Image: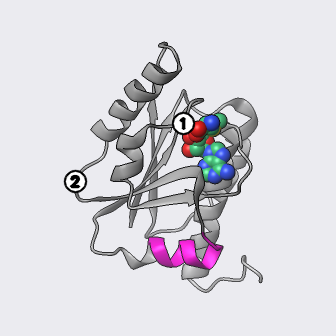
């Protein structure tokens, strides 16, 4: 399974890099995770959201399974995420999107196959990168029946 994470903003900030590295170095094949960083728009809120959403969709193929991270989405348990990533659903690649400071607009929301909420709380973008990386690692461990995940 190929997993692409599209994140609005620069590379990871120093304080999350160590955490992300911790999980990514442990991630085992066959899951192959890569990051795409998109520049922040310098426009005002609504136009910035539209510009960043356009840039996001330019990186998504019609045959990708798109998961948008958004606090208004649905909750998934870790086993449910694992099953979702593991099932492949006939798609070549799963793409996960983390929006910028203003989130994304309706174009990305309506393209998304799943809108996934980590919590009703709004988290800062960089922290979402770290939480997502740990959850992908956890999902892989669940899929491979390894003991990292305890219920
Ligand atoms: C600072 S938040 C933006 C919040 C913004 N108010 C919005 O309307 O989306 C940056 C990004 O982090 C992700 N995010 C933040 N909290 C989240 C949560 N609880 N669940 C899922 N994704 C979240 C979303 O992708 C969001 O676009």
Q: Nearer the viewer, mark 1 or mark 2?
A: 1
Question: Residue 18: which quarter of the image?
Answer: top right
Dot 1 corresponds to which residue? Answer: 103
Is-magenta flag for residue 142?
Answer: no
Residue with the mark numbered 2: 62
Main SS, magenta region, reads helix
Ligand 1 shows up in the quarter that is top right
Q: Quick check: 85 left or right of 100? A: left
Give the residue drawn at x 43%, y 37%: 105
Q: Quadrant of residue 14?
A: top right
Count neighbours of disc 2 (C-alpha within 10 A) and say few if under 14, some if 14 to 19, many if 20 or more.
few
Q: How many marks?
A: 2
Rendered-image quadrant of the C terminus: bottom right
Q: State left or right for residue 123 relative to residue 33.
A: right
- What is the distance, in whole Å, between disc 1 and disc 2 at their CAs? 22 Å
Q: Quadrant of residue 2?
A: bottom left
Q: Magenta residues?
A: 76-85
Q: Is residue 45 above or below residue 109?
A: above
In this view of the protein, which residue sits in the foreground, 139 or 146?
139
């Amino acid at each position: 399974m190929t997993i692409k994470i599209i994140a609005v903003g620069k590379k990871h900030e120093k304080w999350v890099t160590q955490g992300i590295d911790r999980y990514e170095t442990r991630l085992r094949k066959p899951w192959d995770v890569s990051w795409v960083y998109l520049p922040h728009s310098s426009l005002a809120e609504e136009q910035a959201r539209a510009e960043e959403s356009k840039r996001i969709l330019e990186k998504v193929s019609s045959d990708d399974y798109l998961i948008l991270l958004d606090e208004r989405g649905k909750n998934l348990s870790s086993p449910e995420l694992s099953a979702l990533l593991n099932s492949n659903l006939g798609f070549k690649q799963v793409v996960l999107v983390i929006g910028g400071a203003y989130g994304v607009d309706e174009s990305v929301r309506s393209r998304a196959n799943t809108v996934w909420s980590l919590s009703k709380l709004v988290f800062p973008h960089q922290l979402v990168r770290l939480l997502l990386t740990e959850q992908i690692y956890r999902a892989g461990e669940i899929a491979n029946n390894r003991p990292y995940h305890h219920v």
